[in-house]
Image (cartoon, grey):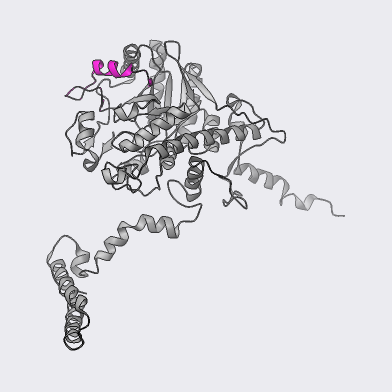
Amino acid sequence: MRKQFFTYGFILLILTALVYYYLKLGFLLLVLLPIVLLVGYYNTLQKKHAILRNFPVLGYFRYLFEMISPEIQQYFIERATDGKPFSRNQRALVYQRAKNIDANTPFGTQLNINTSDYEGIKHSIFPSKVNEDLPRVWIGGKDCKQPYHASLLNISAMSFGSLSENAIIALNKGAQKGQFYHNTGEGGLTEFHLQGGDVTWQIGTGYFGCRTPEGTFDAVKFKEKANFPTVKMIEIKLSQGAKPGHGGVLPAVKNTEQIARIRGVIPHTLILSPPSHNAFSDAKGLIQFIAQLRELSNGKPIGFKLCIGNTTEFEDICHEMIAADCYPDFITVDGAEGGTGAAPLEFSDGVGMPFEPALIFVNKTLIDYSIRDKIRIIGSGKIISGYSILHAIALGADMCNCARGFMFSLGCIQALRCHNNQCPTGVATQDKMLMKGLVVTDKSERVFHFHKNTLYAANELLAAAGKTDFADIDISLFMRGDEFDQLSNLYFPNNLSNVSRH
């Protein structure tokens, strides 16, 4: 292709020069063609990109199409039920509820529900009255001195650094108006989280905001911030679904001097949180750390977040709880399908237990050890609708956290650019110009409306099932498609020959 490029290029240049000489036309083309040929010549000399060496200039179109491929996929190829991690219909539902506009859909379901993997709620022909009050849950065990009355749905862990300061402020102000909590993520408690909304402060392996210069846990710094009035709970992050066993990742391009100062690290460098905590190294140490944080925070609810991997390790934790007579006030269960700003593909795709079996396992294990009544379970795995809230509760959760749903309410379009600082909506970027597109006053209202309308939808589903309290929900409320296969085998067509003909 190199030979053809230069052959046709020089022929076109000569013809353009002749046309301009005799007809005084094509001056701009006469100027541009030599530039294109020079760029093409440079492409043949460089040794980094084989495509450009073989296809001078034309090879740039390959990189252009690659750059905009997510947009092409989303706007021209995806159907309404396609799209990963969330379909167009799911994203539209959040946008509509966040804008507080009609979220009804026309004409019926677009899903193929006559399959064995279908799941649905068993409605009652005698529905209950829809409760106008949004549900809340008390969190706090026997050693907790400051129990917290939490909303059934809250903002899951998303750090300042992964998200922009405007996004964090909007989330916190929305949480304040809706009276639900905002989890800081492992990036630490910052001024942007202190806008009046309730906060769950997450302590990750990097101990950002409560670390010594050497990167170990600093009890003095922790005690100071943990006793802020808006800090309602403390969550120890053991692992998260998107990259369990890896530790947090903040790309160097998003590690500004401001973030580095908050976290106590070197700016403009890749931040990799350690895979594990250095304050403890086993189940016994974890329980002791929970007791320490509870004392330092003057009895606020203390819990931990994890993605289930080796199940025996969670059983060991249960053993230590009982042996020490010390229990977390809550456990947040994340699934391998959980979200993240940045993670190695191998960890996102191939490490950890999915949310549904993990939640079932944690709930059943706590029951088996007769300690389920001492601990609240928070479900955190692709919670985005009233249906997903009921489903999580049926599997064992007491309440739910949601991350990407609240990102959509801020304007996220699932552009898949969280990791490179080029988020076009200003949600997951530290680029000041892009950040300006996210107007806090508008987006905080959308955060509030998404929360309210989603919980109201959960109330409507609860009433449709003939229930009046979320405590009445269990797995018997749901049906699966494989049940229909059994009905088909029983009634049609196997037994059709036995039916008498008249």
In the image, what residue occupies the spot 24% across and 69% down? 58
Is 479 magenta? The answer is no
The reply to whether residue 291 is in sight is yes
- 238 left or right of 492 in image: left
Q: Quadrant of residue 314?
A: top left
- For the point 27% across and 37% down, which residue is it? 249
On the question of residue 382 being in view, the answer is no
Question: What is the magenta segment's predominant secondary structure?
Answer: loop
Q: Position of residue 444 (x, y in %)?
A: 42, 36
Most distant residue in the right direction: 502
Residue at 54% from the left image edge and 34% from the top image edge: 391
Question: 185 or 121: which is nearer to us?
Answer: 185
Viewport quadrant of the C terminus? bottom right
Q: Is residue 139 left or right of residue 230?
A: right
Give the x, y percent position of residue 422: 29, 48
Tell me the quarter of the picture where residue 222 sits. Answer: top left
Magenta stretch: give its range: 205-233
Rendering quarter of residue 267: top left
User: Residue 46: x and y, percent?
Assistant: 13, 63
Q: Position of residue 407 (x, y in %)?
A: 40, 40
User: On the picture, is 468 further left or further right than 418?
Assistant: right
Q: The N terminus is located in which quarter? A: bottom left
Is residue 215 a member of the stretch shown in magenta?
yes
